[in-house]
Amino acid sequence: MNDRIGTTRDGIVIRGARILGGEPVDILIRDGLLVEIGQGLSGGETVETVEAEGLIALPGLVDLHTHLREPGREDAETVTTGTRAAALGGYTAVHAMANTDPVADTAGVVEQVWRLGQEAGYCDVQPVGAVTVGLGGEHLAELGAMADSAAQVRVFSDDGRCVSDAVLMRRALEYVKAFDGVVAQHAQEPRLTEGAQMNEGAVSGRLGLTGWPAVAEEAIISRDCLLAAHVGSRLHICHVSTAGSVELIRWAKSKGWDVTAEVTPHHLLLTDDLVEDSPVGSYNPIYKVNPPLRTRADVEALRAALADGTIDCVATDHAPHPVEDKETEWAAAAMGMIGLETALAVVQEAMVETGLLDWAGVAERMSCAPARIGRLRGHGQPIEVGAPANLTLYDPAVRAAVDPAGYASKSRNTPYQGLTLPGRVVATFLRGRPTVLDGKLT
Amino acid sequence: MKRHLISAADLTRDDALLILDTADELAKISERSIKKLPTLRGRTVVNLFFEDSTRTRISFEAAAKRLSADVINFSAKGSSVSKGESLKDTALTLEAMGADAVVIRHGASGAPYRLAGWVRGSVVNAGDGTHEHPTQALLDAFTMRRRLGPLDGRKVTIVGDVLHSRVARSNVLLLATLGAEVTLVAPPTLFPVNVDSWPCEVSYDLDAMLPKSDVVMMLRVQRERMNAAFFPTEREYSRRYGLDRERVARMPDHAIVMHPGPMNRGMEIAAEVADSPRSTIVEQVANGVTARMAVLYLLLGGADLGGEI
C-alpha cells in the first residue's frame, strides 16, 4: 500500500518525527514542499500518513563524492543501482565523480550522467566535471561548457588522480571563479606514492607493503591551500585522511581562506591494522582504499576535526568494484569501498555515540555543508515550512550486523561486513515523493 | 603448530625448537646412502611458483621427495596464470586435485594468506613479495645452531636492503623468538619507517657492529635500487656496507658469515669472503632441504620419526 504514497494522494503527513532529534512533531508535505510543521496535523482525508514515532528527521543527505561508474563500468554500478543505494542510505542528492569511461570531461558526458539520474528518479545526480582532459593532468577540460550545460556543474575534480602540476592547479582554481565553481582536489603527491599499497607506518613495514606516506597527502594540501589563497579561489579537499592534513586545514581556515574539506565514513572508523589482522583475514583487499586507512591517532584527529568544523562534511567516496577485483592478492586488487548504505550508521557510531556530534551536527555535516560546497539548490536546507521536502527518517535505536546481501548497490565491497552498527534509514523523501519507506525502496 | 606456515611469527618458541630438533634428526638421514623416508607416502605437495626461484623450488622439491610425497610443480611461466587466471582460480584448481600442502612463492606480499582462505591443505610460504620467507629463517637458524650451539644471547647482525627483504623480516621474528639479539644494519633509506617497533636493534654503522657479532648475515641488494635513489652508486654501497676481507678480520674468530643467496659478488659480499671457511653459504643450501623436510613433516603430521631413523 505504501508504494502509492505521494502518487495518488495529494499529500503526506509524517507523524511524531523528531526534527534533528528534537521534540516529536508532525510534518505535512504537499506539492514537494514542507507546508506545515506542528502538533496534531491532519491535512485532510486525502493525505497519507507515515508513522515516525521515535524516528529522527534529517534533511535529505547530500554526498559530495560518489562513484556511480556509469558510463563504462556498469558491471560495478550504474546510475540506477547507485542512486537506489543512495536512497536507501538516506541520500537525496549525490555528486557523481568524473572518473568514468569516457571521462566526464565534456558537456556531453556530464549531461548524460545528469539525465540518467533524472530518469532513475531515486535521488538527484549532480555530475562532477573532470579538471583535465581524460584525467590526464595536462590540459584543462572545458570547464565552462560543463558549467553552462544542463548539468550545471560546479564541482570539478580529477578524483582518483591528483592535479599534481602546480601551474595547472593554479589555473583551474582561477578559472572556475567565473562560474562560482570549486576544485575538489584528490591530494596525493604521485612520486611519493609510486606503487603505494597502504598507509606507511609500523604495519606496512611488518607486512612488506609499499608505504603510502601521510606527507604525500599533506604536501599537496599545503601547496593547494597556499595556491587558493594566492589567487583568491575556493578549494575543496577530498577524503582527508591524516592528522597532519587536519592541522594544515585548520591553519588555512584560521587565515580566512576559502578552503573546505571532507572525510569519509571509513576514515572515521577503520584503521590500517585491519590489513594485518581482521575478522576477514590478513591482507584482505576489502580494506584497500585510496587514500589508505590510517592509524588510530589519525581517526581521532579526523573525528575531532569533523566535530569542530575544521572538516566541513562527510562524503562517502562510495567506490563499487566487482567481486573479482577484490578477490585477489593485495597488490592486484582495486582500491575503494562502497559506503552509501552504511554512511549514516558509521557516522552515528563514530560521532554521535561518542558525543562528538548531535543530530543537528550530523545534518550540517551530511546535508547542509555538502550542498553549500557543491552550490546545490534545493538540498541541504533547514527543515522548515516552505523548504523542498527532501527528508530522511532515521531510527537510531536499533543495532544490527552489517549484511551486504540485501544492498541495492551492484557491488559488495563493504569493509563493515560482520560489524554491528547502529541505526536504520526508515524513509527517504525526494521533493515529497518517498523513495524509501519502511527501509525499502518504493 | 598452526596449520599453515606463512609468517615466522606463526611459530612459538616451542614450535621453532621442535622444527630445529626435527631437522637435526632428519639431517642424519641425509648422511645415509638411502636418503628417502616413507613418511609422507600418498600425500601431495604442490610447489606453486609465481616467481622464478629455481633454488627454493628444488629445495622444497627435494625435501618433499625425500619424505616420499608426490610433488607437483606448478610454475607460473607457461601456465594458465600467464593467461590471466586469478590466484583464486589457481587455488580452486589445486584444491580440486587434492593438495595436502601448497608451497607458494609469489611476488605479492600476503598472497599466501589469500591462498590459505581458498584451500584446505597447509600453506607454506616460500617467499611472498617483500613480506616473509619463514623457511629461509628456519634454515638460517638451523645453520647457526649447528655452528654455534643454542641461539639464546647470540648476536646476529643482518646487513642490507631490509626494506625490501622478506629474509630479514622472517629472520628478525624467528631469531627474537629463539632469544638471539639481532641488529639490522643498512643505509637509512633501506629501512622501513617505524623499524624501531621491530624486536631488534638498528644501526647505520657496520664497522661498529662487526667486533660484537657472532653472525653476520648479508642480504642481497638489487642494483636497480640505486635508480630509485636508495643509494648513490654500487661502489658507494659496497664501500659502506659491503663485507670484504678487512671487515671480516674485525669479526671474532668464531663468527660466521651467512648469505641467503643469490649473491652479488663484489657488491654486498667480496668473493673471497663468500668462499672463506667462515662462510656458511653452501651449508645453508644443504640445510634448506633438511629444514623444509622438518616443516613439511610436522605440518602434514608424519608418523613418529623415532621408529624411522
Image (cartoon, coloured by chain):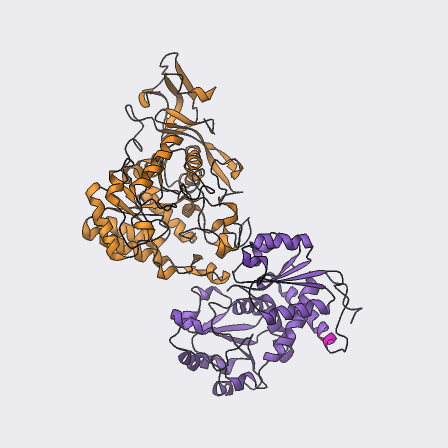
Position of A56 relative to B277 (above/below): above
What color does chain A have in the rendering? orange
Q: Position of residue A317 (x, y in %)?
A: 39, 44
Which residue is nearer to you in this view: B71 or B12? Answer: B71
Overall secondary structure of the magenta stretch?
loop
What color does chain B have in the rendering? purple
- Tell me which segment is drawn in magenta: B27-37
Q: Is residue B258 magenta?
A: no
Q: Residue A345 appears in which quarter of the rendering?
A: top left
Position of A185 relative to B74 (above/below): above
Left or right for A432, reference B200: left
Q: Residue at x 73, y 78 (%)?
A: B31
Position of A313 relative to B82 (above/below): above
Left or right for B146, reference A47: right
Quadrant of the rendering where the C terminus of chain A is positioned: top left
Q: Residue at x 39, y 77 (%)?
A: B233
> Is any atom of residue A270 visible in this view?
yes
Which residue is nearer to you in this view: B115 or A300? Answer: B115
